[in-house]
Amino acid sequence: MKITTSQLKKIIAEEVKKAIIGEAIEAGPVGSAELQTMLDVVCDGFKAQFDPKDPSMDASGGKAVWDQQCETACEVLGEKIQELIMQVEEDLHLGQFYKG
């Protein structure tokens, strides 16, 4: 079976992509301690938005429920940021940002 240069480049790029993603998963997210610190600040900010004078917030379960919603929102935010970091890092290694 013969393959073209273009097909070979695509195969190589796909294998490099797989290897990079595998390494990133093994090593953990880039700057995970910094990311967690940032998420803690964001989550604290979300929690501070609770207003006990707002009847809708109190009727929705109060401060404990609000805090749990904030924790869940921050977990989702962290997952999305990690996905984005991995994608940008992968693009970086594949030369997607080269302008020369």
Image (cartoon, helix red, strand yellow):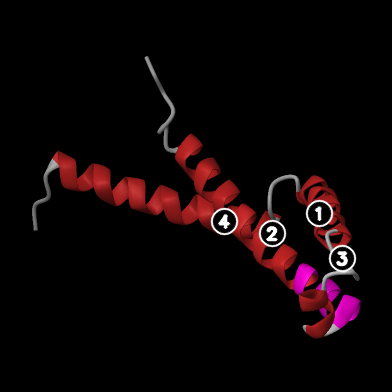
Q: Which residue is mark 4?
A: 83
Marked residue nearer the N-terminal end (3 or 4): 3
Circles 4 and 2: CB distance less than 8 Å?
no
Q: Amino acid at mark 3?
A: Asp
* Left or right for 89, reference 33: left
Which stretch appears magenta? Answer: 62-70
Q: SS at mark 3?
A: loop
Q: Main secondary structure of the magenta part?
A: helix
Query: Is residue 55 within the magenta segment?
Result: no
The amino acid beneath tag 1 is Gln
Check if mark 1's residue and mark 2's residue have beta carbons within 8 Å.
Answer: yes
Q: Which residue is mark 2?
A: 78
Distance between the alpha carbons at the discs numbered 4 and 2: 9 Å
Residue at left 79%, top 70%? 71
**At which x and y percent is residue 92?**
49, 35
Residue placed furthest toward the top? 100
Residue 3, x across and y down, in percent: 12, 50
Q: Which residue is mark 1?
A: 36
Residue mark closest to the camera, 3 vs 2? 3
Question: Mark 3 or mark 1: which comes first in sequence?
Answer: 1
Front one among 100 and 10: 100
Q: Which label number is shown at residue 51?
A: 3
Q: Quadrant of residue 39?
A: bottom right
Around disc 3, counting alpha carbons within 10 Å, would you say few (fewer than 14), some (14 to 19), or many (20 or more)? Answer: some
